[in-house]
Amino acid sequence: MKIVVLTGAGISAESGVATFRDADGLWENHRIDDVATPEGFAADPELVQRFYDARRAALATVAPNPAHVALADLEKVLGEDLLLVTQNIDDLHERGGSRRVLHMHGQLLSALCVDCHRRSPWVGPLLGTAECPHCGYGVLRPDVVWFGEMPYFMDEIFEALTTCDLFVSIGTSGAVYPAAGFVQQARAFGARTLELNLEPSDGTHFFHEARHGRAGELVPAWVDELVHA
Ligand code: NAD
Ligand code: ZN
């Protein structure tokens, strides 16, 4: 059975990483437009670098929770039949043991050169750092996909959505496109669809089945059910 799992900020909530739809559209007390758009970066690059530098530093204070670990266990069983797509920019899936993860919205632990467009693994702050290690002169920005920018791996994701048997959406509000449309895409191509979220998402009615509760409980229970079916 081929499965595509899409995760959002809700899967990392129990690890202590703040989601953003839950706090009146603010992300760690900042307006989304200020810290998650190219216009925000152009207007105040220092604020934006500081914001992501703080998110990157905060990764050291959090750990994967049972939901991340359960998905890594599922990968051990399914191998290439599981595609894990995440909207999260944290590294908790990898630290939970997942090896095949597509970060469609980029990653905190990566820097992108605005000039040569190459990426460099990045662990420290970006504010005040030197030039791009590749070209030697370009400015580095967080390798994060902002509103108005094209998400990564879209061809690969659409291919998987159209050929999977099951699509599962975990901890995502269903408010951010194109990810919010994956359920309809998968369903149109014949997949069964399941939502696991704290509360009904904006697109909950598109799913064949929805279970509501904490990811740390719902995800291990679902994986267990699948593996022992
Ligand atoms: P979102 O913040 O819009 O929605 C989170 C969803 O998770 C909500 O529907 C909420 O009800 C649910 N939720 C909260 N706690 C939960 C729990 N314990 N168990 C299960 N569900 C829970 O997040 P989104 O849909 O991923 O979209 C927001 C965008 O923000 C993403 O593109 C992402 O790049 C970015 N973001 C990422 C992180 C991260 O990397 N961890 C954190 C915040 C925002
Ligand atoms: Zn460069």
Image (spheres, grey):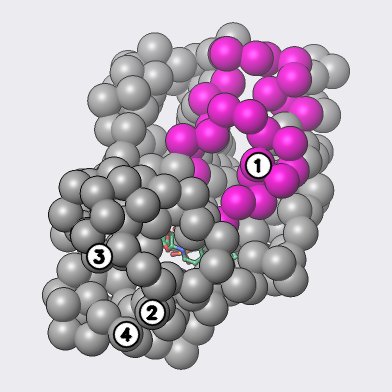
Residue 201 at least partly seen: no
User: In the rendering, which numbered label is found on residue 128?
Assistant: 2
Residue type marked 4: Glu
Q: Residue at x 43, y 82 (%)?
A: 50
Instruction: State which mark lies toward you, 1 or 4.
Output: 4
The extreme bottom residue here reads 29
Q: Earlier in the sequence, mark 2 or mark 1?
A: 1
| Rendering coords of residue 100 (x, y %) | 57, 28
Badge 4 local density, few (<14 within 10 Å), some, or many (20+)?
few
Q: Which residue is mark 4?
A: 46
Q: Earlier in the sequence, mark 3 or mark 1?
A: 1
Q: Residue at x 72, y 25 (%)?
A: 74
The quadrant of the picture occupied by the N terminus is: top right
Q: Is residue 45 left or right of residue 111?
A: left
| Rendering coords of residue 103 (x, y %) | 45, 43
Badge 1 local density, few (<14 within 10 Å), some, or many (20+)?
some
Q: Earlier in the sequence, mark 2 or mark 4?
A: 4
Residue type marked 1: Glu
Instruction: State which mark lies toward you, 3 or 1.
Output: 3
Q: Is residue 216 left or right of residue 157?
A: right
Mark-to-mark CA distance, 3 and 1? 27 Å
| Rendering coords of residue 217 (x, y %) | 79, 50
Mark-to-mark CA distance, 1 and 4? 29 Å
Q: Is residue 203 left or right of residue 82?
A: left
Residue type marked 2: Gly
Q: Which residue is mark 3?
A: 139
Q: What stretch of residues is rendered in magenta? A: 73-102
Mark-to-mark CA distance, 3 and 2? 10 Å
Magenta span includes 27: no
Q: Are marks 2 and 1 in contact (CB under 8 Å)?
A: no
Q: Are marks 3 and 2 in contact (CB under 8 Å)?
A: no
